[in-house]
Structures are given as structure tokens and as C-alpha cells.
Image (cartoon, rainbow, N blue to C red):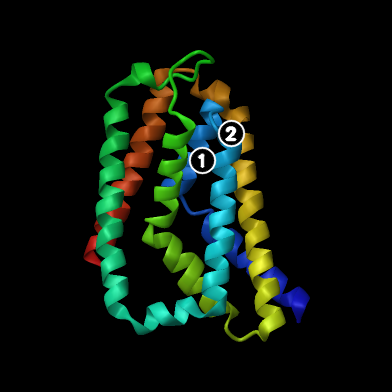
Amino acid sequence: MSTTAFLHGFTSTAILIMAIGAQNAFVLRQGLRREHVLPVVLVCALSDAVLLQVGVWGMGGVLLARPEWAQLMRWAGALFLLAYAVQTAARVLRPGQLLVTAGGPGASLRTTLATVMALTWLNPHVYLDTVVLLGTMATPYPALGRATFAAGGALASALWFTGLGLGARWLAPLFATPRAWRVLDAVTATTMLVLAGVMALS
């Protein structure tokens, strides 16, 4: 039972976390810039582990029972994603700031951590996936099974963000020109805009 729950948590989290989103795009960008990568990866992995615990031990059911909370999260998330899309789109118009250079200006650690915390904790998709959906999947298991389900999910999250952040350096040669960064930021901004629209209309 424990092994089954662990594998269930690992595979379910891995499938959900690979979807393109603001958090993944930010981790990829930091990895390409080689800027505060380990702190960003650590924040993402630990946040997912905490949210998994919250979902597995009952918060998912609470959110499902309080639809007004879901509505509030939906609109707050849509506005946040829209603001992030606008900010990212603005970078497309400033290609001079998109180059990855060893001596170029970069965001401070405090600013970087504040951004990744916002992208994680203010993103309703994180709650829907991690708290509600994964929490619901873990419900049929007994206490030990829920704990191992959460452990499997946390491992999948940690491996994904570590690979995305540290593995991005191998993609650095592809992003050696402003045009490549323009494309990445344009795709990210478009994705966030679509997600904001879907969330607002859902």
C-alpha cells in the first residue's frame, strides 16, 4: 500500500507540474541567467511540499466545501497572471536587457525570492493542482498512505525544479541573442494571458 501510494503521488505530481506556467517559466529564466538558481529551486520545492501536506490532510475538502473562497482565488489569480503577462511582454520591447551576460545587471536576491514566492503562493493553479486535486487523490489512502503519497509528490516536485533550474544552463547557447529571449518572453506572456482569460471566464 505504501509503495503504491508513493508511486501514485510521484507520477500524479510529475504529470501536473510539467504543464507550462508562470512558475516554471520563471525557474527556466533564472536557470538560463544562472541567477539565484538554488534559492529559487528551494523555494519552489519546499512550497510544493507544504501545499501537498495541506491538501493531503484535508484542506482540499475545505476548499471544495467553500465555493466563495474558490471564486476569490480565481479572480485574484486572473489579475495576478494578467499583471505578470504585461510585465513579461514589456521585456520583449527591451531586448537589450534580455542578454545573459556575466556582468550584466540582475535582480537582487530579495526581489527574486519575492517574485517566485508570489508566482507560487498567489497562483490559484498551484492550489487547484496541489491542494485540491492531489489532496483529493490521496483521500482514499489511510494515514500512512497519505504520508507516502505526499512524500512521492514532494520528491517529484524537487526533481523537476532542480532539473529545470540547473539543467537550463545547457540551453544557454540557444539564448545567446536578444531574439531568443524575445521569443521566450513572448511565449511566456502569451501563455499567462491565455491562462488569465481562461481563469476569468471559467
Residue under numbered circle 2 = 168
Residue in view at x 34 percent, y 20 percent: 95
Q: Count every numbered label the image shows and give the total.
A: 2
Residue in front for this viewpoint, 124 or 95: 124
Left or right of residue 141, residue 172 in this image: left
Q: Residue at x 66, y 72 (%)?
A: 149
Relative vertical location of residue 34 with respect to residue 41 in this rendering, above or below? above
What SS does tag 2 mark?
Answer: helix
| In-front residue for pair 81/109 | 109
User: Looking at the image, which residue is at 26% across and 45% down?
Assistant: 83
When asked about the image quadrant of residue 195, the answer is bottom left
> The residue tagged with tag 1: helix, strand or loop?
helix
Mark number displayed over residue 27: 1
Number of other residues with Cα within 10 Å of mark 2, as a class: few under 14, some 14 to 19, many 20 or more:
some
Q: Quadrant of the C terminus?
A: bottom left
Residue 198 visible in image: no
- Classify 58 as above or below 188: below
Q: Amino acid at mark 1?
A: Val
Asked whether the beta carbons under mark 1 and mark 2 sit within 8 Å of each other, the answer is yes
